[in-house]
Image (cartoon, rainbow, N blue to C red):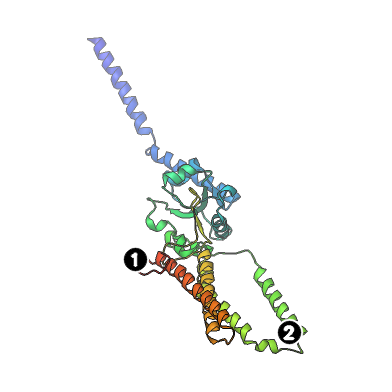
Amino acid sequence: MASVWAKSAVNLHILAVFFVVLTCLPPGGGQKKKENLLSEKVDQMMEWSSRRSVVRMNGDKFRRFVKAPPRNYSVIVMFTALQPQRQCSVCRQANEEYQVLANSWRYSSAFSNKLFFTVVDYDEGADVFQQLNMNSAPTFMHFPAKGKPKRADTFDLQRIGFASEQLAKWIADRTDVQIRVFRPPNYSGTIALALLVSLVGGLLYLRRNNLEFIYNKTGWAMAALCVVFAMTSGQMWNHIRGPPYAHKNPQNGQVSYIHGSSQAQFVAESHIILLLNAAITMGMVLLNEAATSKGDVGKRRIICLVGLGLVVFFFSFLLSIFRSKYHGYPYSFLIK
């Protein structure tokens, strides 16, 4: 009986020690571990950003620092294909604008650990592309500090273009972080303008005794047509929006020169439209020449047929492009 009481006393003593130890432990051990992990991730991201404005990531880094919690910072990720064998000229152009934006943020007085710029190259993180079901590059995505990315967290590059200023506006909408874009000085436009003025001035000086060419109607007509072709083909839109030259699928290498939407276009598309308008105009000029000239009838007939062929064929081509962009447009001519 005494042994039973002794055992009971020992058990009570052990139980009391256990409760004392339990009450002495600091509460929230899991929370402390979570805070330490978050601090390590932020410190690591800040260290990488101090070396490069854009942090390069592979699949493991992306999953740990961008996808996995805890995270109290936003991440802008450019998914791209910069390797030479991919032959993605648009990716290189977008990367230059992305670098300008990231440098503007990194060296601004407002720089903080609330926003980071990263890049995932297809050849370094193909598993990330597969995980996100991504089949085109370049693509810009925002991963918010809390929650999953929404539809608006994917930048509409095809409609808006990839100019740094446009990216900065999108980031401000998604993160409330205002970035003022600072571009390195570019004197190429100033030099080109100075050369043009010098060339025109030199030409006028050399021909100062004979300036009749200034009154040449054909020359002024050609200059006016060049301006009209540039404006009607969308060159001003390209200058404002900064769209890519073309789009190349990094998986199958297929290049698209015509944008599939009526709300956007590629630079190559505007060049194609310019050439088509020029060819149609040439056809109209030839038709007018055949109708108004007083030369040989056979020669005039040939000029008329050539002009008619130019107008019919290239207008059909132009109409087919219009039809491919405005889905549901019912009319076509020769080319569908």
- The residue that appears at 53% across and 73% down in the rendered structure is 279
Position in image of residue 317 (x %, y %): 46, 67
- The residue that appears at 24% across and 12% down in the rendered structure is 4
Q: Secondary structure at mark 1?
A: loop
The relative height of residue 41 versus residue 287 in the rendered view (above or below) is above
The relative height of residue 272 versus residue 252 in the rendered view (above or below) is below
Is residue 25 something one can see in this rendering?
A: yes
Position in image of residue 151 (x %, y %): 38, 56
Is residue 277 something one can see in this rendering?
A: no
The relative height of residue 129 versus residue 295 in the rendered view (above or below) is above
C-alpha gap between disc 1 and disc 2: 54 Å
Residue 255 numbered tag? none
Position in image of residue 241 (x %, y %): 50, 67
Kindly identify the amino acid type of the residue bearing the numbered disc 1: Gly
Kindly identify the amino acid type of the residue bearing the numbered disc 2: Leu
- Front in this rendered view, residue 285 or 124: 285
Q: Is residue 239 left or right of residue 188?
A: left
Quarter of the image that includes the C terminus: bottom left
Query: Disc 1 designates what residue?
Result: 328
Q: Return the disc, 1 or 2, that comes first in the chain's sequence.
A: 2
Q: Residue furthest left?
A: 1
Query: Disc 2 designates what residue?
Result: 204
Q: Is residue 72 left or right of residue 268?
A: left
Position in image of residue 277 (x %, y %): 51, 73
- The residue that appears at 49% across and 70% down in the rendered structure is 314
Q: Secondary structure at mark 2?
A: helix
- Front in this rendered view, residue 80 or 151: 80
Q: Nearer the viewer, mark 1 or mark 2?
A: 1
Quarter of the image that includes the N terminus: top left
The relative height of residue 30 versus residue 193 in the rendered view (above or below) is above
- Front in this rendered view, residue 96 or 44: 96
